[in-house]
Image: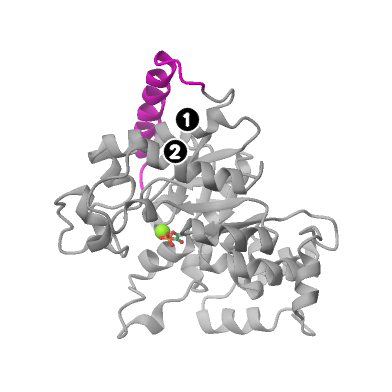
Amino acid sequence: EKARLAKLRRLPAVTLDGEEVELQANLEIPAELPLIAQAGAQGIGLLRTEFLFMNREDLPDEDAQVDAYTQVVEAMAGDCVTIRVLDWGGEKDMEALAEGIGPFHAGPNPALGLRGIRMLLKRPELLEAQFAAILRVAGAEPGTQIRILLPMVTIPAEVSQAREIYERVQRRLRRKGIPLPEKEPLLGAMIETPGAALAADAIALEADFFAIGTNDLAMYTLAVDRAEAEVSHLYDPLHPAVLRLVQFATEAALRLRMPVSVCGEMAGNPRLVPLLLGLGIRALSMNASAIPRVKQMVRSLKIDDCARFARRVMEQGDPKRIQELVMGFGEAGS
Ligand code: PEP
Ligand code: MG
């Protein structure tokens, strides 16, 4: 089994009928880099940058960030690296993150408070330092593909305001004579709230790409905190409401020929691959360890079957029935 999965590493992630699927890795700490190469990921679809801010008393300066991003970009040897700017707040460990950031009002419900891009727009100096560090790395390493991802977007103005800051940082670096990349890294939006998913067409006018974060999308759609034992049984990314939002956001992106990926836990579950491909998704980002099995699944599928299967699933209103359909994919009659 191990040898078989190792062999898979060199095989392309392509369906039986020749449709290519991009399989990328999510990265939480640089120590996971060797795993990513082993797994045969085609780049990083989600680099969470919270690690830079954790367990320290001060803030990481621009140079420290340049070092960290350079390490990742060099390890990926020309493959795309999608760097998500700080997603402070929500269910993330704010105690560990908070010290250098200073006193912050989390509010009675941090998940509905100042988190992600909301917080960064209140503290633009944090966003500026991250943008500057990313641009310096992109400028110093031609031939690398870097993309920037904004967390917790709910309105188009958050993307356009972030872009203004991004352009301001570029002008500042140019004035200082720092080499910039020929093509600036794309600026994308996480789609991880129901609001963002339902307004995806409007957000798409401001963003260069989407990454659908099904972890938060399921939590916010179903009003269920996974860490809350009393209600965790209701947490279900296969709830039709979550799937309809994924479909809606995906279709908004596809209409504009804008890149869209899924980067929540869903993406790493091989059993959910037929459904996601059937909904039009062609890029998945997951824990590196999940890539071989997901690739194996991709290589066993035909897109037509996936599309037909997704249509059947999307007609269902009962999460339990959807679960049954998903578990039974490929069996007679499904
Ligand atoms: C998500 O919400 O699905 C996601 C990928 O982001 P994170 O898990 O870091 O919140
Ligand atoms: Mg999230």
SS for callout 2:
helix
Give the magenta-colored segment's residue range: 154-179
Residue under circle 1?
136
Point 40% across, 42% down: residue: 65
Neighbor class of circle 2 (other Cα within 10 Å; few <14, some 14-19, many 20+) is: many
Residue 243 in picture, x, y percent from top left: 53, 66
Q: CA distance from mark 1 to mark 2?
A: 7 Å
Magenta residue check for 152: no
Q: Main secondary structure of the magenta part?
A: helix
Residue 106 in picture, x, y percent from top left: 18, 57
Location of residue 319 with respect to 106 vertically, above or below:
below
Residue under circle 2?
66
Along the line of sight, which residue is nearer the eye, 260 or 145?
145
Magenta residue check for 165: yes
The answer to whether residue 200 is visible is: no
* Horizontal side of residue 297 vs 134, given as left or right: right
Location of residue 79 with respect to 110 vertically, above or below:
above
Three-letter amino acid code of the residue under disc 1: Arg
Question: In the figure, residue 165 lies in which quadrant?
Answer: top left
